[in-house]
Image (cartoon, helix red, strand yellow):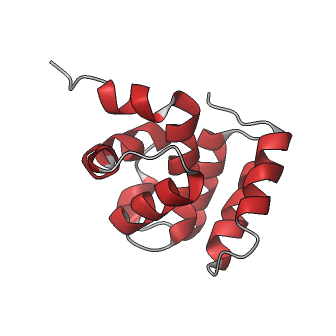
Amino acid sequence: MTVITSAEIQEYQAQLKDYPDVDVKAALDAIANNNGNLEAAFAELAQKNGEAGFRQMDLEELANRCRDTVCSKPTEDFLGLLNLVAGFLPPPVSLAVPVALFILKIGIRNYCRIPEAA
């Protein structure tokens, strides 16, 4: 289980206060409502807003699918990473938020160094 703190949620909310897509703010609300649990928030958002294919995936699986895109331009900046992930995924943008936060939580350098399955 990957969890972010309420202080981290508030920090990300402050960074996104002027973000034009309301789905992003709704995603942070879902994360807060799930006590910072990124997997639970992702599952909720996928059921509510995701395409059928995403409803069958978990957070880590979707993050792994974004690896080539994210690691081609790795950034530790939340907004930059969010935009990379959102550009890779189809709408709604809300699914990109827990994916980006998951990647940041495990560390972009660690995420990009994880070897492919043997």
Q: Quarter of the image containing the C terminus?
A: top left
* 41 or 10: nearer the viewer: 10
Tell whether 30 sits left or right of 106.
Answer: right
Compared with residue 79, is residue 34 higher up or lower down, i.e. above or below? above
Residue drawn at point x = 56 percent, y = 59 percent? 79
Query: Which of these two is toward me, 7 or 34?
Result: 7
Q: Residue at x 32, y 50 (%)?
A: 73
x and y, in percent, of residue 10 in the image: 83, 51
Task: Residue lying at the far bottom in this picture: please name it.
Answer: 20
Q: Is residue 118 visible?
A: yes
Near-viewer residue (94 or 14):
14
Residue 87, how many percent across, how many down? 38, 68
Residue 29 seen from this side: no
Count of all numbered marks drawn on residues in the image: 0
Q: Residue at x 46, y 42 (%)?
A: 58
Give the residue displayed 24% in from the left and 22% down from the top: 115
Identity of the residue furthest to the top in this view: 118
Task: Locate residue 73 relative to residue 1 in the image: left or right.
Answer: left
Give the quadrant of residue 101.
top right
**In the figure, is residue 97 to the left or right of 85?**
right
Tell me where residue 6 appears, x and y as whole percent: 84, 42
Quadrant that contains the N terminus: top right
Instruction: Please state which of residues 7 and 73 is positioned toward the viewer in this rendering.
Output: 73
Is 79 located above or below residue 33 in the figure?
A: below
- Rendering coords of residue 98 (x, y %): 58, 50
92 up-or-down from 6: above or below: below
